[in-house]
Image (cartoon, rainbow, N blue to C red):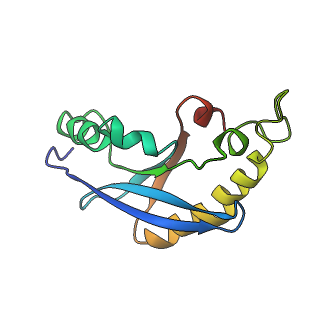
Amino acid sequence: MDTSIEVNVDAITFHSDALDRDLRIDFYLPQNHAPLSLLLINDGQDLVAMEFERILNKLYQEQSIHPLLCVGIHCGDDRRNEYGMIGSPDYKGRGAKAGLYQQFVREELLPLIFDKFRHYEFIEHAYAGFSLGGLS
């Protein structure tokens, strides 16, 4: 594996019709590498605070991971309703918009990613998140 991999970070603002709001999406892309795996990450706003770019660069340098495109999806003000179990809001009704969030990911975000990075082949897809973002 190439140990000289450097990560480029690109941020966009994207309007979701399903969620009826703008979202910030951060793309952590290793330079000049294909194929890639795809990792979607809820609570993407936390990646900056944890120095995710530095962590990825270190993992590549150590040859601990294979190249992957990480997509950090920033949460909105209605996080507690957008994240959760589809069809099973908790006793306070939190998670009521989880179905809409899934619709956003499937019908808007993934097509955006596959179009923006159409020259890449994604060999694996995975999803992660922090706390409630990991439940979604």
Residue at the farthest left position: 4
Q: Residue at x 15, y 43 (%)?
A: 3
Q: Residue at x 64, y 56 (%)?
A: 105
Image spot of residue 2 (x, y percent) = 18, 47
Number of labelled discs?
Answer: 0
To which quarter of the image does residue 29 belong? bottom left
Q: Quadrant of the N terminus?
A: top left
Question: Eyeballing the image, is 25 above or below 92?
Answer: below
To which quarter of the image does residue 12 belong? bottom left
Q: Residue at x 23, y 40 (%)?
A: 54
Image spot of residue 31 (x, y percent) = 24, 59
Horizontal placement of 40 versus 19: left or right?
A: left
Front residue of 52/36: it is: 52
Question: Eyeballing the image, is 128 above or below 102?
Answer: above
Horizontal placement of 79 versus 118: left or right?
A: right
Horizontal placement of 118 versus 57: left or right?
A: right
Q: Quadrant of the C terminus?
A: top right
Question: Eyeballing the image, is 35 above or below 75?
Answer: below
Residue at the farthest front position: 77
Front residue of 102/132: it is: 132
Image spot of residue 64 (x, y percent) = 27, 32
Image spot of residue 17 (x, y percent) = 69, 68
Question: Eyeballing the image, is 29 above or below 77?
Answer: below
Front residue of 76/54: it is: 76
Q: Residue at x 53, y 67 (%)?
A: 14
Front residue of 46/120: it is: 46
